[in-house]
């Protein structure tokens, strides 16, 4: 049995940030992860980190963009905290040595991104996530925080009261993947779940093999509701065989999508007569899927993304890494032939229901990062908002005085007995290619949120948000 | 699936005359689609028959498990895997594991060459499995664990020594001074950022360390990846001269930069194209400059 003040499950961006914060508060912390920290999927994030850093920009504009992009389904207080604290956290990263791209005057560069009213996406080349992950792991090494790498956490140690809100989490159980040894991890002051996404639920995803939603499943078994699980983002341009992401930059530079009849379907079939290929992610994904479902897909599976007309010089100058990706992962030369692309699962907006401090309804159990649902992203996450989310909300559990946040609530009925999932073997996964035949049978096994009141009441400005 | 759709169409056209026109359009599209599909299917079958041998790829995979009596002795297993365009070494291994032998063990996660889990020794060279196209390799494809590392099981090697070396160079940013204001960033020249850019791309896959003859013979040698990490900080102008001096002291010790014999094997195998040998040479030059002070 290992004993710590705080156990952090998962060591991607959110887990590392949470561990650093807890360590700074003086806690004895351990990170338990089924990978080595630098193998985490935060490293695959390309775009950047949104933060209102410059003159002419304002955190309120960032908050407004976030709320609008989310179809007004975010919680206003969470959006407030997020937009206010993001600049501080980005500068903190810079102080930790993250190699951001720079302007001529030596300040951190920012660029425009979809859905933003100001170019506020800070970035480090096209590998922002990689640099963020490594910078943060370096800080963990510096602080000498204990890391249990390649330890798989199986379950949480939670008391067994009938009402989930009366339960307490005391730690977790994990096994060492190498030896098979099973060990208990006792956490005096709390367990923080930071296990990342759940993309492997889907047949075709940009997520890593490791992103299996373990944290959400563990929390659910412990009685914590999952929130907004239907809010899944699909990225329109991923390679069909591996799900490797082809950046929005290709369409930004003028790349064109064609169907099997070589029609420029975004215009010719009227999906987005103004924006064409540059319509928002959900619109383009849906258009591609419609084309394939109506028999105009190539090999009944994908469409073509063509950038040959841009010319070799421009492609090599601005999209060189795309050529490498297409060559290495699909065996296609983007200079000679169009690249096959199809929509792929990309991000889960929902997750473990928690408040702005990462607290779930079980005492001593916290959540952070993609696995959590602070309700920041609503129905759609803006590009460049995932990394600042973990920067802002992952440190919160460490700095929250226990017990003060969750006021006593009227008791709610216990969750109904669980239905058996029809297809529970890991290899039979629902595709994101839904047909009328498969959809109802999948949704039939879901059940209502057992505890709808499990969240802090949002303040009166929700109405104000909806009106803006 | 398609028969069901057709049945639905027939039913609805019987029910209402108004829908007839729509249905016939739909019917026509469905027929066209079915014809195209049959055509493709025929082509695929023809291709399969004629290329039966060429459409598969043979893997020879290293197997070893000290805990299982039959597998205590290292051996090679042969797997024949159906090939498709764009298939990588990792795809083939996953196919072999899922279809032939679920005990086949290898590390992998992101499948896009950023997590650094699946560095393997493929056809005599360190490569990332996910980034290596089978079409570029001569068959049978021989897949082994990274050389010069202890094998835990099958293709999994013990990375502890590699991690220890990485962490021995104080791999964390540690500026002499930071701005007082928590909202004020440090300034960094564009050229300086460009200088350290390649060194920051390291994904800790361990391919370089495995390819290095010196590291194989000297366990205390820091190795290319760790020296590259030291380079990344020593060359970062934000850290200041005092810290740089300390960093130089770490890399110029006996088992540091001087061990490198410029064989360029690390540079050749690096999946991220980091000029490792050049970085090591540059640190040697810095060390000489600091110690001799001719100018």
Image: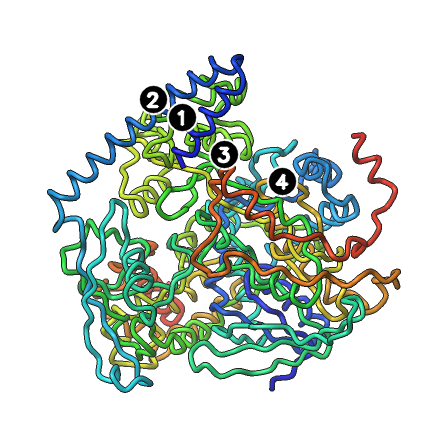
* Between marks 4 and 1 in the image, the one whose residue lies nearer the viewer: 4
Report the front residue among B233 and A331. A331
Q: Which mark is residue A285?
A: 3
Q: Quadrant of residue B74?
A: bottom left
Along the polypeptide, which appears first: circle 3 or circle 2? 2
User: Which residue is depicted at the point 33% across and 39% down?
Assistant: A323
Do the residues bearing badges 3 and 2 touch, measured as CB atoms within 8 Å? no
Q: Are marks 4 and 1 on the same chain?
A: yes
Residue A389 pos. (x, y %): 65, 51
Query: What is the distance, in whole Å, between disc 2 and disc 4 at their CAs?
Result: 31 Å
Quarter of the image where one finds residue B57: bottom left
Instruction: Kindly identify which residue carries mark 4.
Output: A380
Q: Assign a secondary structure to mark 3.
A: helix
The answer to which of marks 2 and 4 sits earlier in the sequence is 2
A252 to A149, vertically: above or below = above
Q: Position of residue A87 (x, y in %)?
A: 68, 48
The Cα–Cα distance between marks 4 and 3, rounded to whole angstroms, is 13 Å
Q: Is residue A160 above or below residue A10?
A: below
- Mark nearest the camera among 3 and 1 is 3
The kind of secondary structure element at disc 2 is loop
Residue A384 in sight: yes
Structural distance between the alpha carbons of marks 3 and 2: 18 Å
Lower sequence index among marks 4 and 1: 1
Residue at the spot of label 1: A256
């Amino acid at each position: 049995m290992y004993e710590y003040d705080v156990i952090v499950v998962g060591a991607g961006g959110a887990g590392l940030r949470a561990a650093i914060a807890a360590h700074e508060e003086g806690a004895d912390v351990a990170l338990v992860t089924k990978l080595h920290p630098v193998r985490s999927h935060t490293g695959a994030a390309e775009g950047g980190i949104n933060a209102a850093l410059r003159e002419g920009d304002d955190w309120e504009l960032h908050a407004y963009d976030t709320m609008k992009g989310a179809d007004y389904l975010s919680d206003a207080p969470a959006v407030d905290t997020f937009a206010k604290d993001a600049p501080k956290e980005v500068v903190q990263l810079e102080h930790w040595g993250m190699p951001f791209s720079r302007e001529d005057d030596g300040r951190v560069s920012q660029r425009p991104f979809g859905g933003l009213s100001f170019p506020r996406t800070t970035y480090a080349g096209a590998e922002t996530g990689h640099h963020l992950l490594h910078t943060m792991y370096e800080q963990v090494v510096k602080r000498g925080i204990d890391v249990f790498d390649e330890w798989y956490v199986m379950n949480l140690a939670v008391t067994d009261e009938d009402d989930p809100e009366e339960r307490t989490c005391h730690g977790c159980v994990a096994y060492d993947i190498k030896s098979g040894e099973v060990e208990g991890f006792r956490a005096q002051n709390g367990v923080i779940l930071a296990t990342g996404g759940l993309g492997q639920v889907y047949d075709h995803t940009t997520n890593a093999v490791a992103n299996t939603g373990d944290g959400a499943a563990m929390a659910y078994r412990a009685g914590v509701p999952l929130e907004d699980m239907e809010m899944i983002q699909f990225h329109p341009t991923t390679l069909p065989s591996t799900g490797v992401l082809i950046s929005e930059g290709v369409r930004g530079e003028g790349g064109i999508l064609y169907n099997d009849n070589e029609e420029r379907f975004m215009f010719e079939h009227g999906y987005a007569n103004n924006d064409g290929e540059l319509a928002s992610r959900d619109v383009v994904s849906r258009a591609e899927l419609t084309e394939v479902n109506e028999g105009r897909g190539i090999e009944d599976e994908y469409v073509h993304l063509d950038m040959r007309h841009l010319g070799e010089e421009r492609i090599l100058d601005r999209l060189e890494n795309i050529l490498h990706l297409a060559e290495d992962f699909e065996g296609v030369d983007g200079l000679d032939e169009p690249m096959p692309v199809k929509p792929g699962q990309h991000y889960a907006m929902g997750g473990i229901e928690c408040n702005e401090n990462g607290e779930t309804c079980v005492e001593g159990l916290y959540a952070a990062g993609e696995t959590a649902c602070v309700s920041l992203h609503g129905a759609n996450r803006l590009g460049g908002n995932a990394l600042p989310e973990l920067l802002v909300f992952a440190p919160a559990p460490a700095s929250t005085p226990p017990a003060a946040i969750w006021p006593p609530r009227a008791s709610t009925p216990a969750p109904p007995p669980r239905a058996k999932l029809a297809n529970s073997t890991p290899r039979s996964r629902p595709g994101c290619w839904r047909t009328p035949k498969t959809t109802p049978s999948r949704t039939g096994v879901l059940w209502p949120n057992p505890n709808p009141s499990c969240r802090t009441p949002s303040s009166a400005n929700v109405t104000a948000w909806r009106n803006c | 699936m398609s028969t069901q759709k057709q049945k639905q169409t027939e039913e609805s056209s019987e029910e209402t005359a108004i829908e007839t026109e729509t249905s016939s359009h739909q019917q026509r599209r469905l027929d066209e689609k079915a014809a195209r599909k049959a055509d493709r299917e025929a082509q695929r079958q023809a291709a399969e028959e004629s290329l039966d041998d060429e459409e598969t790829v043979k893997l020879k995979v290293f197997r070893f498990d000290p805990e299982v009596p039959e597998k205590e002795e290292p051996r090679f297993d042969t797997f024949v895997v159906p090939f498709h365009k764009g298939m990588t070494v990792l795809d083939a291994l996953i196919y072999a594991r899922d279809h032939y032998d679920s005990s086949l063990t290898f590390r992998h996660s992101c499948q896009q060459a950023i997590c650094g889990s699946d560095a393997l020794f493929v056809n005599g060279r360190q490569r990332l499995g996910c980034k290596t196209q089978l079409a570029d390799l001569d068959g049978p494809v021989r897949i082994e664990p990274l050389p010069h590392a202890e094998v835990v099981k099958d293709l999994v090697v013990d990375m502890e020594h590699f991690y220890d070396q990485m962490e021995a160079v104080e791999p964390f940013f540690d500026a002499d001074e930071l701005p007082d204001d928590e909202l004020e960033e440090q300034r960094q020249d564009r050229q300086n950022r460009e200088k350290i850019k390649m060194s920051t791309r390291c994904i800790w896959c361990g391919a370089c360390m495995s390819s290095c003859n010196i590291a194989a013979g000297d366990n205390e040698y820091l190795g290319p990846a760790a020296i590259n990490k030291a380079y990344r900080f020593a060359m970062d102008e934000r850290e200041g001269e005092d810290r740089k001096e300390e960093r130089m002291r770490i890399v110029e010790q006996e088992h540091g930069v001087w061990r490198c014999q410029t064989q360029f094997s690390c540079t050749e195998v690096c999946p991220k194209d980091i000029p490792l040998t050049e970085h090591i040479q540059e640190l040697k030059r810095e060390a000489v400059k600091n110690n001799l002070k001719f100018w």
